[in-house]
Amino acid sequence: MSDHSNTVLTAEGLIAGYLPGVDILHNCNFVLGDGELVGIIGPNGAGKSTLLKAMFGLVPIREGTVTLHGDPITNLPAHQLVRKGVGFVPQTENVFPSLTIVENLQMGAYQLPKSEVAGRIDGINELFPRLGERAKQRAGLLSGGERQMLAMGRALMMQPAVLLLDEPSAGLSPAYQGEVFENVKAINATGVSIVIVEQNAHRALQISDRAYVLDQGKNAYEGTGRDLLNDPKVIELYLGTLARR
């Protein structure tokens, strides 16, 4: 593993799975540096989302350790991790459709003193002006891309140091996918360290500083986004014709 100074989040030797005795991750390792945008790609069923959820306390870790700023957080419950500065955006059901945009953002700030909430919402609206323009609109009426924007905005209400994104472009049209990737880059530019699990491997590698390729719950490859995009083996096994577009 290469040396990363200012490491924010690490996972070492993770063995984890949803059911007792059924391991999905087999000795997985992961490092996120301060301010980095790191992608996790790989075929369906490779354990990408499981790795993300294990680091966020949603999948039991049987062996191995997860650290945040050097402190152990292995198997801590999600609500404690939110307090410690980790945000998580699940792939589905990540907004409250019957609530307005502003109410969704307020839900993301439930652990904050009331006096701080309005200021945080202003900050999110600065990052995503469209949310501010439609503050009173119900989330269920938003497009797929706007829903993801709102889900990310809600996770950012607690001003996390780390944001974990589980397949944010899944099920979206190419235009909305492009918008989501631009939003991820914009969030990263504010200083938030980001881990993005993506089915759209090509686009994920384009925006990632570094990336991990998982296969069958193990680390298969690791490198800069650019190197993996141009690696003949990675192209052949995981990117196919996409890499030549």
Image (cartoon, grey):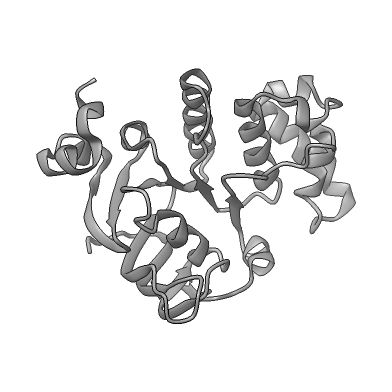
Farthest residue toward the left?
232
Quadrant housing the N terminus: bottom left
Where does the image place residue 183, in percent across and percent down from the top left?
Answer: 53, 30
Disc tally is 0
201 to the left or right of 81:
left
Where does the image place residue 122, in percent across and percent down from the top left?
Answer: 76, 32
Specify the quadrant of the image occupied by residue 201.
top left
Where does the image place residue 60, in percent across and percent down from the top left?
Answer: 52, 75
Frontmost residue, 36 versus 54? 54
Q: Is residue 210 above or below residue 219?
A: above
Q: Residue at x 39, y 73 (%)?
A: 23
Where does the image place residue 22, in percent across and percent down from the top left?
Answer: 42, 75
Specify the quadrant of the image occupied by residue 152.
top right
Frontmost residue, 51 versus 126? 51
Frontmost residue, 210 versus 117? 210
7 to the left or right of 84:
left
Specify the quadrant of the image occupied by residue 27.
bottom left
Q: Residue at x 68, y 63 (%)?
A: 83
